C-alpha cells in the first residue's frame, strides 16, 4: 500500500511537470495612451479695443518768436527728414543779419587800418624815430581791432542762426498727426506747430481694466485690426 502511494505521487509529479513545460508563457499586455502636447491658453481670454500709435512722437516748434506765414503740410501728410514744413516772417531776422554783415565789414576795415599803423610804428621804433610808448599804443589798438572782428563774426553767426530758425524742418521721416497753429498767428518760441509720428516701431495702446492688471502681465498679446482680423501679429507687453 505504501509502495502504491509513492508510485502515484511520483507519477503525478511527472505529469504536472510535463504540463508545465508544454504551456508557453504569454507576456502581459500593458495598455498605453498617447497625447499631443500643444500650446493652450490658461485661464480666461479677454478682448480689448485699442489703437495703433507710433512709438516715437515729437512736437515740432520754432526756436524764436514770430508770425507764422506758411504751413506747408496738414494732418495725414507724410514728410521726409529735413523737409520744410512751416515758415515764419523772416524780415526781422533778415535785417539783423544785414546789420551783422555790415558790422563785420566795418570791423575788418578798421583792422586793416590799424595793422598798417602798427607796422609803421614798428619800423619807426626799429629806426629809433618813435618811442616804445607810441608803438605799444599802436599794438594795443591792433589787439582791440582784432577783438572787434571776432565779436562781429560771432554776431554774424548768431544772426545767421536766427535767420535759419525762421524755417521749421522735419527731424525724421514720418506722418503729421497734429497741428497747433495756423498761418497768420503770432507764435511763441517752443509753441507746438506740428506733431509728427516717426516711422518705425509701433505700439498698440489699450485701456486695461483693473481686474486684468491685478491678474498679472500676460506673456504675449495677439493684436489684429478690427476691420480686417486677418491682419494680426503677436507682441509683448512693456
Image (spheres, helix red, strand yellow):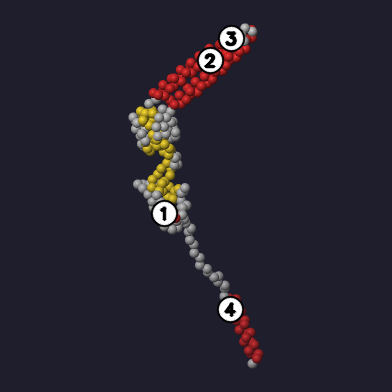
- Mark 1 and mark 2 lie on one chain; the one further toward the N terminus is 2
Identify the residue at the far right of this view: 3
Image height check: is 142 above or below 188?
A: above
- Could you tell me residue 124's position as x and y percent? 61, 8
- The span from disc 1 to disc 3 (Cα, nearest Å) is 87 Å
Between 45 and 185, the residue placed more toward the observer is 185
Residue 111: image tag: 2
Q: 221 and 168: which one is in front?
A: 168
> Where residue 184 sits: x, y (%)?
34, 29
Circle 1 packing at 10 Å, graded few (<14), some (14-19), many (20+), is few
Give the residue pinned by disc 4.
Answer: 19
The reply to whether dot 1 and dot 2 touch (C-beta < 8 Å) is no
Instruction: Check residue 120 in the rendering and tell me which mark sits there, or answer none.
Output: 3
SS class, disc 4? helix
Q: Which residue is depicted at the point 52% across and 19% down?
A: 148
Disc number lying in front (4 or 3)? 3
Residue in the picture at 54% in, 70% down: 28
> Residue at (45%, 56%) from the top-left corner?
215
Q: CA distance from mark 3 to mark 2?
A: 14 Å
Using a 10 Å C-alpha cutoff, classify the residue at mark 3 as few (fewer than 14 neighbours), some (14 to 19) or many (20 or more).
some
- Residue 13 falls in which quadrant of the image? bottom right
If you read the primary sequence from the N terminus, does the residue marked by circle 1 or circle 3 appear first?
3
Q: Which residue is mark 1?
A: 210
Dot placed on the residue nearer the N-terminal end, 3 or 2: 2
Front label number (1 vs 4): 1
Amino acid at each position: 500500500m505504501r509502495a502504491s502511494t509513492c508510485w502515484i505521487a511520483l507519477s503525478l509529479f511527472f505529469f504536472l511537470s510535463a504540463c508545465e513545460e508544454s504551456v508557453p508563457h504569454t507576456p502581459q499586455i500593458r495598455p498605453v495612451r498617447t497625447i499631443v502636447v500643444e500650446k493652450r491658453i490658461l485661464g480666461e481670454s479677454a478682448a480689448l479695443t485699442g489703437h495703433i500709435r507710433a512709438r516715437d512722437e515729437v512736437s515740432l516748434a520754432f526756436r524764436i518768436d514770430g508770425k507764422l506765414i506758411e504751413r506747408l503740410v496738414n494732418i495725414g501728410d507724410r514728410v521726409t527728414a529735413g523737409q520744410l514744413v512751416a515758415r515764419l516772417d523772416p524780415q526781422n531776422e533778415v535785417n539783423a543779419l544785414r546789420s551783422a554783415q555790415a558790422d563785420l565789414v566795418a570791423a575788418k576795415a578798421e583792422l586793416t587800418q590799424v595793422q598798417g599803423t602798427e607796422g609803421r610804428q614798428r619800423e619807426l621804433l626799429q629806426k629809433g624815430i618813435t618811442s616804445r610808448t607810441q608803438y605799444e599804443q599802436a599794438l594795443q589798438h591792433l589787439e582791440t581791432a582784432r577783438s572787434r572782428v571776432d565779436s562781429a563774426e560771432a554776431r554774424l553767426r548768431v544772426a545767421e542762426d536766427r535767420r535759419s530758425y525762421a524755417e521749421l524742418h522735419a527731424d525724421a521721416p514720418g506722418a503729421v498727426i497734429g497741428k497747433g497753429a495756423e498761418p497768420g498767428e503770432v507764435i511763441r518760441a517752443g509753441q507746438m506747430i506740428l506733431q509728427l509720428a516717426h516711422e518705425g516701431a509701433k505700439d498698440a495702446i489699450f485701456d486695461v481694466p483693473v481686474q486684468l492688471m491685478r491678474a498679472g502681465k500676460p506673456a504675449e498679446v495677439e493684436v489684429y485690426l478690427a476691420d480686417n482680423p486677418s491682419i494680426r501679429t503677436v507682441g509683448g507687453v512693456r
